[in-house]
Image (tube, rainbow, N blue to C red):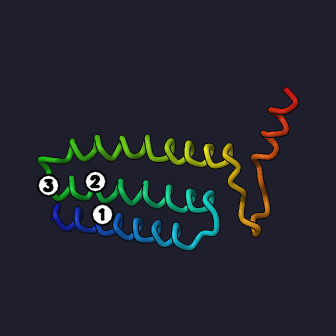
């Protein structure tokens, strides 16, 4: 029963990774790609690695540590990439409606 549960969890993680890769391919600019890629790949990698840990009980704690590390570092690295893109002058897509970072830029310039 445990290998079946592990295969289901791993398969759902693979589906999220596939959806994340499609989101990166389809989105128009770097900021939307980061959004699509980070959310799906974080959950997809977490489920895939934990699923492997469920299938191989001897590896469970090791895979859990790796999965928690991914949960912590993936959003932080995505934030760093987005911030570096904004500071280097990468523009939003023409179809973007809201730019919340302008409020922060105006606030910083008034300090």
Instruction: Name above or below for residue 25 compared with residue 75.
Output: below
Instruction: Name above or below for residue 16 compared with residue 64.
Output: below
Q: Residue at 54% of width from left, 62% of height from top?
A: 36
Percent position (x, y) of residue 57? 14, 51
Instruction: Name above or below for residue 50 compared with residue 16.
Output: above
* 12 sits to left or right of 60: right
Describe the element under mark 2 as helix, strand or loop: helix
Percent position (x, y) of residue 31? 63, 57
Q: Residue at 60% of width from left, 69% of height from top?
A: 27
* 83 sits to left or right of 40: right
* 107 sits to left or right of 15: right
Q: Residue at 83% of width from left, 35% of height from top?
A: 107
Describe the element under mark 3 as helix, strand or loop: loop
Mark identifier at residue 25: none
Cβ atoms under marks 2 and 1 closer than 8 Å? yes
The residues bearing labels 2 and 1 have C-alpha atoms spaced at a distance of: 8 Å
Quadrant including the N terminus:
bottom left
Lower sequence index among marks 2 and 1: 1
Describe the element under mark 1 as helix, strand or loop: helix
Quadrant including the C terminus:
top right
Could you classify mark 2 by the number of other residues whose Cα lies within 10 Å: few (under 14), some (14-19), or many (20 or more)?
Answer: many
Percent position (x, y) of residue 59? 16, 47
Mark identifier at residue 9: 1
Quadrant in which residue 13 is drawn: bottom left
- Residue named by callout 3: 56
Q: Residue furthest right?
A: 110
Quadrant in which residue 14 is drawn: bottom left
In front: 46, or 26?
A: 26
- Residue named by callout 2: 50
The residues bearing labels 3 and 2 have C-alpha atoms spaced at a distance of: 10 Å
Could you classify mark 3 by the number of other residues whose Cα lies within 10 Å: few (under 14), some (14-19), or many (20 or more)?
Answer: some
Lower sequence index among marks 1 and 3: 1
């Amino acid at each position: 029963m445990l290998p079946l549960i592990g295969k289901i969890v791993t398969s759902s993680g693979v589906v999220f990774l596939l959806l994340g890769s499609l989101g990166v391919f389809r989105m128009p600019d770097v900021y939307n790609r980061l959004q699509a890629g980070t959310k799906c790949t974080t959950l997809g990698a977490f489920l895939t690695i934990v699923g492997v840990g469920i299938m191989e009980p001897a590896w469970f704690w090791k895979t859990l540590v790796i999965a928690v590390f991914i949960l912590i570092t993936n959003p932080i690295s995505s934030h760093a990439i987005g911030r570096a893109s904004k500071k280097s002058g990468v523009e939003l897509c023409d179809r973007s409606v809201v730019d919340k970072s302008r409020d922060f830029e105006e606030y910083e310039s008034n300090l």
